[in-house]
Amino acid sequence: MSAGGLALLFVPADRPERFARAAASGADSIIIDLEDAVAPAAKSAARAALAAPGALPGGIEIFLRVNAAGTPWHAEDLACAARLPLAGIVLPKAEAPERIAAVSQAAGGPPVIALIETARGLAEARRLAAAGVARLAFGSIDFCADLGAAHTREALLHARAELVLAARLAALPPPIDGVTTAIDDEAAIEDDARHAASLGFGGKLCIHPRQIAPARQGFRPSAAELAWAQRILAAGPDGAEAVDGAMVDAPVRARARQIARRAGIPTP
């Protein structure tokens, strides 16, 4: 993971002229999107273009977001994926744990990121996490639409906390948080990422290259957090003692190590 958390950048599958630029954007991975970003009439042509020799850029992990199970395009998307050199499949509106292995197999065996976007998906999050997925991700905008809820931190707090817990119970990496719709508001993007990091998320989905730097910055610890962690770690590796007037023991040191790692500082 990059210091500051993962940044995964969506790029429409029917815009191949953007693939190389997305790969060079500084994102950790790109997600070529056959679902929301491609109109129904353009999906077949997008799949055909993806299968052309040299269509995909090199030097970066590439995921493919297929259309959801139960849509007319799902099976053909998976067949297309089986012919591509992918790092994984992003499965939108994931709800059925028993389908995860079948999705991976139909796509040629790549790992599956389960995108939680519905009430049913959240209710099944722990089972999905234990079903062999590589990671959980949060489609917060679709989730709010499904519930009829406002897209606010208060309305989404329970869902985000449940995804973090589900991932931890299944020994998965921390989940990936959903997109910020603002493209040019760097402060809002960074603040959204910082909020996600505070809840235990490990990265963020991005919809434009300009979002990558502020999203990653939001996952880095603040100067005050890092200074605190360094004081804790400098106090020694064992026992209980006071630092800054507060008792320090093993759980506090574990938190300090997590903060240091988020800043890219190796710890024992």
Image (tube, grey):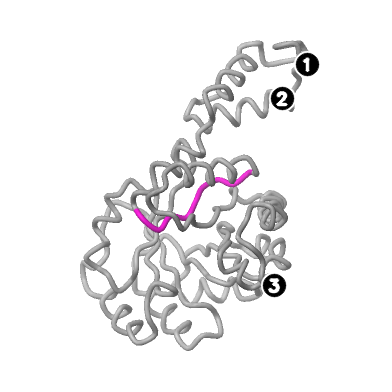
- Residue drawn where x is 73% and y is 67% of the image: 123
Q: In the figure, residue 125 lies in which quadrant?
A: bottom right
Residue 135 location (% of width, % of height):
57, 57
* Residue position for label 1: 247
Label 2 packing within 10 angstroms: few (<14), some (14-19), many (20+):
some
> Is residue 206 one of those drawn in magenta?
yes
Camera-side residue: 260 or 171?
260
Q: Which mark is residue 42?
A: none
> Is residue 105 one of those drawn in magenta?
no
**Marks 1 and 3 close (CB-CB < 8 Å):** no
State the CA–CA distance, disc 1 to disc 3: 43 Å
Residue 102 location (% of width, % of height):
56, 76
Residue 54 location (% of width, % of height):
21, 66
- Residue drawn where x is 74% and y is 27% of the image: 251
State the CA–CA distance, disc 2 to disc 3: 36 Å
- Residue drawn where x is 47% and y is 30% of the image: 264
**Tag 1, which secondary structure?**
strand
- Residue drawn where x is 61% and y is 14% of the image: 231
Q: Earlier in the sequence, mark 1 or mark 3?
A: 3
Q: Earlier in the sequence, mark 2 or mark 3?
A: 3
Above or below for 188 versus 224: below
* Residue position for label 3: 120
Camera-side residue: 248 or 177?
177
Name the residue type under label 2: Val
Name the residue type under label 1: Met
**Marks 2 and 1 close (CB-CB < 8 Å):** yes
Q: Is residue 252 left or right of residue 212?
A: right
State the CA–CA distance, disc 2 to disc 1: 9 Å
Above or below for 37 versus 232: below
Q: Is residue 172 left or right of residue 12?
A: right
Magenta-drawn segment: 200-208
Q: Which mark is residue 252?
A: 2
